[in-house]
Amino acid sequence: MKWFSPARALAALSLLSTDAVRHVSAIDLDPASPESIKDAASKIAKELVAQYATKDNAGVHVLGGYPGVLYPPYYWWQAGAMFGTLLDYWRYTGDDQYNDMMREGMIHQFGEKLDLMPYNQSKNEGNDDQVFWAFTMMSAAEYNFPAPPDDKPGWLAMVQSVFNQFVKRYQKEVDDGNCGGGMRWQIYPWLNGWTYKNTASNGGLFHLGARLAMYTQNDTYAKWAEKAYDWMDNSALIEEDGTINDGMSMTTDPPCKEADRIPWTYNYGIMIAGAAYMYNYTNGAEKWRSALARHLNKTEQFFPEYYRGIMTEICEAKELCNTDQESFKAYLARWLGVCIQMAPWTHDIIMPHLQTSAKAAAQTCVGASKHGAGNYACGTRWWWEGFDGVQGVGQQMTALNVISVLNVDRVAPPYTSKTGGESKGDPGLGTGSVDDDIPQLHTHPMTTADKAGASILTILVMAFVFGGAWWLCIE
Ligand SMILES: *[C@@H]1O[C@H](CO)[C@@H](O)[C@H](O)[C@H]1NC(C)=O
Ligand SMILES: *[C@@H]1O[C@H](CO)[C@@H](O)[C@H](O)[C@H]1NC(C)=O
Ligand SMILES: *[C@@H]1O[C@H](CO)[C@@H](O)[C@H](O)[C@H]1NC(C)=O
Ligand SMILES: *[C@@H]1O[C@H](CO)[C@@H](O)[C@H](O)[C@H]1NC(C)=O
């Protein structure tokens, strides 16, 4: 615990005397004030965008290389997730200055076959990577984000494409008798995690199905969402008390019985949002009310009293978060906001947590930008006093999402096709054969790095194989 340490207090005092300007510029967020929320969010968004979109004089993306990607060490999926965070920023604050840039990046990554598997990325793409891009396309539909040009599919169609691909992959697991169904983590056998069934992928199918059902009012999507949820609930991924585990190996005997139990905020976020949409879509069905209640109950662990109720990722205590994990709190914050809208009875449970966490996050955003965007680089650990020295895309995303979402009560719920949503769909996109998904397989030989895989949390499989990684994370 560093917050009350006398040594740090002294250090802070000496900083104050030598560098007063820096402290004047600190963000003192009033979580109840829309002006304060917008002001804080805009400063943090500016720093985030600076990390994505530095262009040279000819207008070429220097850092990302081309639209829709981030520079290393960030993987492709995180760029998709970042556009989702920026869509929320626009939605919750009304600031549309980055919208053209976002739209360009999102459309550029549709993929040559309109499957969110662009050739530059697909050979080490996992289901969880793909679904994070689909989540962003769904938000674009739900927020009536300016549509792609007429000769391209709409945002909704791109989500349907991924949903249809997921259904094919799930069905193949059923046909092959692999754990009675469920999504594998990976799309391709050459990647680490091919024999791991994880929450981000299965929860991704559940979550996409729930949102598509709500948007289109087509019950086929809801049936698939329920099927994915029930399969997870009957597996080691979801426990009776609402605990959501990360994944399970197919190579144990029996397969799919041993869960990796490390709790991650984003897995809870994915599942809570899916359950909240299903709750609303079914007009308050008891099944989804109780699913929400039990998952929310277990979400309390991320707001420990030990850290004054501030949202905390488990890897923070020992500073072991990788660049993927540094962004996870963004998704829990984002989808707790959605939960408030879809299931208003959760408002008073969730909002105090978001306010406490957002205020703590804002006070960390006093780091000097490495990208010349000012002094609003945010830290990883929100329970730390001031900036903790580590800056990056994940840190900006998490702070931006948790602060923007405080405006959730002031913004209309996501549009559906019934309430004014205008995104163009294509229910048949992505329904070709499974082999159609396999890209340039014979033209690009795999490198060792490709085989190592770029999917979210490669390290977790290692941890799982070596018998649980709690010792890494817990005092
Ligand atoms: C693939 O990479 C090349 C540069 O190597 C880039 O010009 C192109 O835009 C990328 N394609 C996509 C779909 O991102
Ligand atoms: C569904 O969401 C709408 C919009 O937020 C809300 O008014 C309604 O009460 C919700 N339905 C249920 C059953 O809570
Ligand atoms: C929430 O969890 C606590 C234990 O932490 C338990 O006593 C309580 O019954 C749970 N509530 C619900 C609604 O599941
Ligand atoms: C509902 O969605 C399913 C799955 O994509 C599709 O096959 C069906 O045609 C849709 N039904 C309607 C009425 O649009």
Image (tube, grey):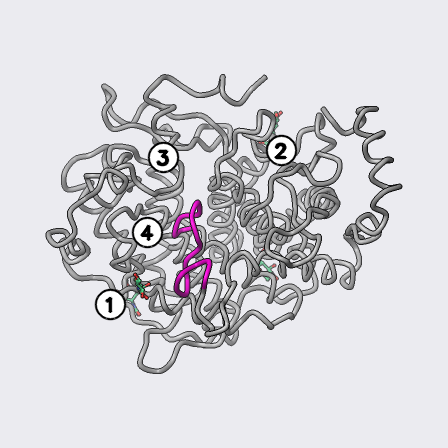
Residue matched to label 3: 458
Q: Are marks 3 and 2 in contact (CB under 8 Å)?
A: no
Q: Inspect the magenta stretch and tell me whether residue 418 lies in it.
A: no
Q: Amino acid at mark 4?
A: Trp
Residue matched to label 1: 428
Measured from the top left, where is residue 263 in percent x and y? 50, 30
Horizontal placement of 292 versus 223: left or right?
right
Check mark 2 vs ligand 3: CB closer than 8 Å? yes or no.
Answer: yes
Q: Which mark is residue 300?
A: 2
In the image, which is nearer the foreground, mark 4 or mark 2? Answer: 2
Identify the main secondary structure in magenta: loop
Residue at 50% from the left image edge and 74% from the top image edge: 100
Measured from the top left, where is residue 4 in percent x and y? 81, 27
Q: Inspect the magenta stretch and tell me whether residue 67 lies in it.
A: yes
In magenta, the rendered stretch is 62-77
Q: Amino acid at mark 2?
A: Glu
Residue 412 is drawn in which quadrant? bottom right
Measured from the top left, where is residue 280 in percent x and y? 52, 56
Q: Earlier in the sequence, mark 3 or mark 1?
A: 1
Residue matched to label 4: 224
Check mark 3 vs ligand 1: CB closer than 8 Å? yes or no.
Answer: no
Residue at 51% from the left image edge and 59% from the top image edge: 52
Q: Within 10 angstroms of label 1, few (less than 14), some, or many (20 or more) residues? A: few
